Amino acid sequence: MKRKIKREFLNSVDLPLFVELGEGPRKYIWDIIDELNLSSVYIIAGRTSYEVAGRKIAERINEFITGTHFVKEGGMDEVKKLTVDLVYHDIDCVMGIGGGKVLDVAKVFSSELNVPFISVPTVASHDGIASPIASFKEDGKPVSVTAKPPTAVIADLIILKHSPIRLLKSGYGDLISNTVAVKDWHLSKEVTGEDYNEISASMAALPAKLMLDSAEKLDFRNLAHLEMLVRGLILSGVAISIAGSSRPASGSEHRFSHALDYLGYSNATHGEKVALGSIIMEYLHEKHYGNGDWERIRFSLERIQAPTTAKEVGLTKEQILEALMLAKKIRRKRYSILEDVNPDKEDFEVVLTKTGIV
Ligand SMILES: NC(=O)C1=CN([C@@H]2O[C@H](COP(=O)(O)OP(=O)(O)OC[C@H]3O[C@@H](n4cnc5c(N)ncnc54)[C@H](OP(=O)(O)O)[C@@H]3O)[C@@H](O)[C@H]2O)C=CC1
Ligand SMILES: O=C(CO)COP(=O)(O)O
Ligand SMILES: [Zn+2]
């Protein structure tokens, strides 16, 4: 199969210019503002994240702040309203301080204004902290929106250490899901000739492997371990920018999670859903190509006390099967183990039983 190599992206990849990750990195905010020659920073935050991190940042850079918005529902409607309200304001940077909902609004808003985006995550629940992707709901259905990646990421490990543990575990789930996403991507390269970027794939897969290798002793309240997780999520975001799509970090396991969202099933977090999907899809990769170790994924999730069964995420067997069948119909162009093996409902039932998900 002759492959079409995409070369144009080499000159046009947008990557974060500044990444500050450590204890109390907000001391660098001044320097970043100075380096970027900014004068009017617009803050987007959540009520909690503002108290946890935003207020102190605002005090530090008070003279540069031109306004603050507290995210309500999130989503494209809120971005559109902000854009209409503020398009003629003097804003030369948007700083998002918060969880995924806040960062997604800030990311897309900054893209609409075409100004730099500074990402200040207060939770590390998924790889959106440094990626060019926002994930919104429209009429209750998930939609992925592509924006510009952050110009700077300022991740304070002390704040993240005290964030809800369930969200840190979700970050772990999203990161290890890259293992499956990259296998799907590689499979597609082999079967369909899809363009594949080794650097992007490695940046996504290696931190995921490191996490899985460390699962035995992982403790997210330990700063060194937490740093490994956050670094991995940042690299995952950069891998997405390099690939020009979420391909390295979103494969069949994310399609399962999107299907659950379409159907409106489960209140599980993004990371919990993609982690469950990873067990299922890794099983298929292992069974059909001997490429994978689904038990290792399940073990690692058990080890960090994240859900590995339908019951733990409030799903029935029928709901999971329905989502798996729907996952096959979503994003069909993104060739994966689902297209390759084309499992039917009975096949999926076997997977669910063998993996102990139901
Ligand atoms: N871009 C992407 O690739 C992806 C984006 N998403 C999107 O991200 C969102 C989910 O993100 P997620 O981070 O899980 O959740 P949220 O952004 O909804 O945050 C969860 C809760 O944590 C609170 N919070 C934030 N920081 C802290 C802290 N340090 N300590 C205590 N509480 C805190 C928030 O409060 P408050 O808001 O009041 O500050 C909020 O109530 C969804 O909108 C989803 O669609 C999901 C997957 C991928
Ligand atoms: O969650 C993501 C990557 O981890 C974003 O991917 P999607 O493009 O599937 O929304
Ligand atoms: Zn994800």
Image (tube, helix red, strand yellow):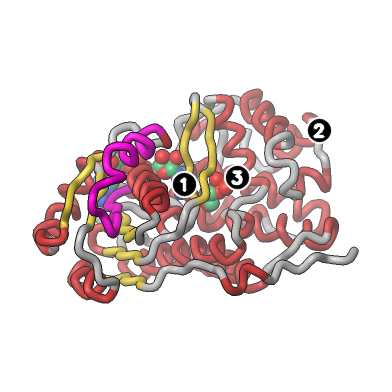
Secondary structure of residue under mark 1: strand
| Mark 2 neighbour density, 10 Å: few (under 14) some (14–19) many (20 or more) | few
Judge by depth and name the residue closer to the eye, 271 or 350.
271
Residue corresponding to mark 1: 134
Circle 2 or circle 1, nearest the eye: 1
Label 1 beta carbon less than 8 Å to ligand 1: yes
Q: Amino acid at mark 3?
A: His
Specify the segment rendered in magenta.
77-99
Q: Residue 75: where, in percent of width, then height?
A: 41, 36
Residue 344: assigned label: 2
* Residue under the image location 19 percent in, 55 percent down: 53
Query: Does the CB distance between marks 2 and 3 fall below 8 Å?
Result: no
Examine the structure image and report whether residue 320 is included in the region drawn in magenta.
no
132 lies left or right of 60:
right
The answer to the question of whether label 1 and label 3 lie on touching residues, with beta carbons closer than 8 A, is no
Residue 37 coordinates in the image, percent (x, y): 25, 71
> Crowding at label 1, few (<14), some or many (≥20) Cα neighbours within 10 Å?
many
Q: How far, Cα to Cα, is label 1 from label 3? A: 14 Å
**Residue 113 appears left or right of 188:** left
Closer to the eye: label 1 or 3: 1
- Does residue 87 belong to the magenta stretch? yes
Locate residue 48 relative to residue 277 in the image: left or right: left
Q: Is residue 142 above or below residue 109?
A: above
On screen, residue 214 above or below 264 = below
- Residue 331, compared with residue 29, is above or below; it is above
On the rendered image, what quadrant is the C terminus found in? top right
Numbered disc 3: secondary structure: helix
Q: Earlier in the sequence, mark 1 or mark 3?
A: 1
- Mark 2: is the Cβ under 8 angstroms from ligand 2? no
Between 73 and 117, the one nearer to me in the picture? 117
